[in-house]
Amino acid sequence: MSKLNRREFLKGAGLLTAGSVLPMSLVELAFADAKQNFTFAYISDSHIQQIKGNQFVRNWDRGLMRAVAETNLLDPKPDFVLYGGDIAQLGSKPEIDHGLELLSALRYPVHYALGEHDYYLDLGEYWESQLGPQWYSFDHKGVHFIVLNSILTYQDWIDKWPTAEQRMATMAGLDNPNGSPFMVGGEQRAWLADDLSKVSLETPIVVLSHSPLQKIFRNWNFWTEDADQVQALLRPFEKVSVLYGHVHQIQYNQIGNISFNSAMATAWPWPYPRSYAQAPSHMPKLTVPMNRADPFFERDATGWQLIDLHSGNVDLHYALYDNTNRVVAFNEQTGQPEDTRYQDSGGQVPAQMHY
Amino acid sequence: MKRFITAPAAEPVARVTTHAGPFRSAKIHRPLLALLLGLLPAADALAAEAAQPATPLGLPPLAVPADNPQTPEKIALGEKLFNDKRFSSTGEIGCVSCHEPAKGFSDSPKPVSTGVNGLNGTRNAPTVINAAYLDSQFWDGREPTLEAQSLQPFVNPVEGGLADHRPILDVVRTDPDYRAAFDDVFGVSGEDVTMDHVAKAIASFERTLIAGDSPFDRFYFGGETDAMTPQQIRGLSVFLVEGRCNSCHVIEQDQALFTDNEFHNIGVGINDVEEEVPQFAAAFLKAKNAGADVDKTVLTDPKSSELGRFAVTSDISKIGAFKTPTLRNIALTAPYMHDGSLATLEEVVEHYDNGGFSGDSDHANAYLSGGIRPLGLTEQQEDDLVAFMQALTSPKYAALAQQAQADDAAGAAPAQEPATADQEADQ
């Protein structure tokens, strides 16, 4: 892999990011002249779930179908799509196959990351047979993209289950105390160090992982056990953006040179809504129920995102159904990602200080 | 919700009094009070109270724009304009052509409206009744007010067919009756009469077309336990519970407009052209950005019409989404949906029960609203739901429709003076 030079890349003009909707025309204006800028779409967490035979949970199917259909309408077209992991709910072939069939309607190349729901039935074997290596990198228009499998865990835990199904079902529980923390692991970190050694420090880096490469809350596995070691490998680079799924909500953070942005799920939102009472909802059961009413609109608090990559930083345009679309953009002045609408402290909801 | 079904709203007598009484008593006291406060209201504000019908049972108070107060003279002028067919390229089409009083102010049973020279548009004529309460006008909400809405059909090629509003101004500036009326109402004449005055008068008339007092209103808000049949009462329960209809067709605690004023893709029209959306959505947006008129495009191009709210906002999440219509007087305005593609209320219920498809399509489009899902209603529940919707007809419009049918049967011409018929029905 040749050393990348991004001088030209950095000349790109800033994008328009103020829109609260995701208008095709606005994107078109923004890209009317900046050759080095590009966009990609980001779809994540579809959790395609087989009920039996050819029956799949309609709600999750519709979420993915809608994200795919709307992504296909983007004009000008995104260069590619990143898929953030968890195609399946319980990692089975029918679920992965059905998810990939729905994703096959995308009119763009897709780069996939592996989620724990795709992995813990057969340890990624079927996923790999369909989509290739569990971690890899590629270059696009002066940017180095790295896709990691961040949902590995301790071998002892993997080996302790009598059946693969039990292992999968346990890891599929978000707050299951019998679960195990996610990690990138030594082998992959060695690969990452080697991969990064071939990239110039000025090259913008985008890392795609399923779990956050930062430690948020261990009990929910909003967590990667060796996040600090991965961050250390990324620290020498000027501009690093980590994109992750798993959390089914909008999160953003800055740690040193690394920007963190999360993706919305197409399946169900965080917090989990109360189930639709008239028919089985197939919403995963949680150990501790959360306080969110049934929103009626099944797509409420789900969505997908369009990402502008400019000047080495990412801006995420969130398409949120029956809601106000949001933009989380990198603020050059403060050096961190910020919600362009809700940054004003007067408009913020005070954080909950008790638990 | 069940509580309301078994024990309809408390204090029905007090409520009825509230609806009937306040204007009369207020008129006695308000000038005195205002004088004491040094805020004597203008005479036309008092006239407006007299002109505007009292709020019917089941409706909220109507907000009237401050710059267009109601007066009896303005309402009468608006009605005259509403019924005037000279305001079209052929002299045969007026507002009333597609919004007939005897058809619940729609053009039932036409699926889509017919304008000049027999040209058809793409949309089913929405009722004008209670349109005054809506947050936006037209199926895609492309105009915010009655005033703004009223100006468009005159100059749409498949409606009034005029190239511009000039011919209307020529009439209202020269016709002796109109000259007198505009002078009386707005104090303007000659070149000073503008389309703004025309729009205000039409909107004032439309603000008198409000209707509640249906069997449902008497049952739910009026406490008349026998105002609805047992089947209709069961249907109300389906409406609120299993059908979840009220998530969009809203019934509130003290009034019901049966709309959330939002836009939803419910799988009508768009299902059949889904595969082509990427092509024609992009083409539409390109034309719109180049200056194409949205009103003309969506009514003349069937595919662009199916873009729904997206055509107005360019928001991808509103592809194929149309405004939630009121359900009041729905029994008078068949067929249904923005394209008139469902002939009966039974077909509508089946469409929703399927989860957003019916007829020729066997699945819902990918852009479908998250609120649309298979309901699993029983046949009995579906029948009950249809029966409930038949309890939403206001007596004065039911009477108009019955009179027209009687006239038709007798070979007589349909009623030409809807206002007169209105008043009779009121008494």
Image: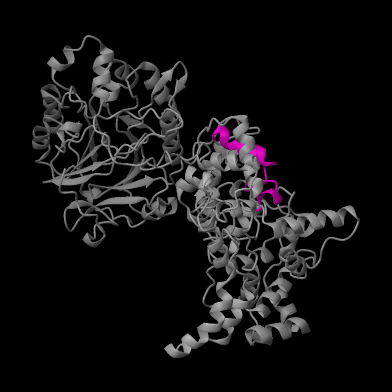
Asked whether the viewer can see residue B298, the reply is yes
Query: What stretch of residues is rendered in magenta?
Result: B329-355
Q: Position of residue B154 (x, y in %)?
A: 68, 66
Q: Which of the 4 image quarters holds residue A117?
A: top left
| B207 falls in the magenta region | no
Identity of the residue drawn at 40% across and 21% down: A50
| Image quadrant occupied by the N terminus of chain A | top left
Q: Position of residue A13 (x, y in %)?
A: 28, 56
Q: How many marks?
A: 0
Looking at the picture, does residue B15 appear above or below residue A214?
below
Identity of the residue drawn at 66% across and 46% down: B390
Q: Looking at the image, which is closer to me, A160 or A12? A: A160
Q: Position of residue B409 (x, y in %)?
A: 88, 52
Compared across the picture, whether A9 is left or right of B121 comes to: left
| Image quadrant occupied by the C terminus of chain A | top left
Q: Looking at the image, which is closer to me, A332 or B152? A: B152
Compared across the picture, whether A92 is left or right of A197 comes to: right
Looking at the picture, does residue B414 appear above or below residue A355?
below
Compared across the picture, whether B419 is left or right of A148 comes to: right
Looking at the picture, does residue B138 appear above or below residue A38?
below
Q: Looking at the image, which is closer to me, A279 or B172? A: A279
Asked whether the viewer can see residue A107, the reply is no
| B336 falls in the magenta region | yes
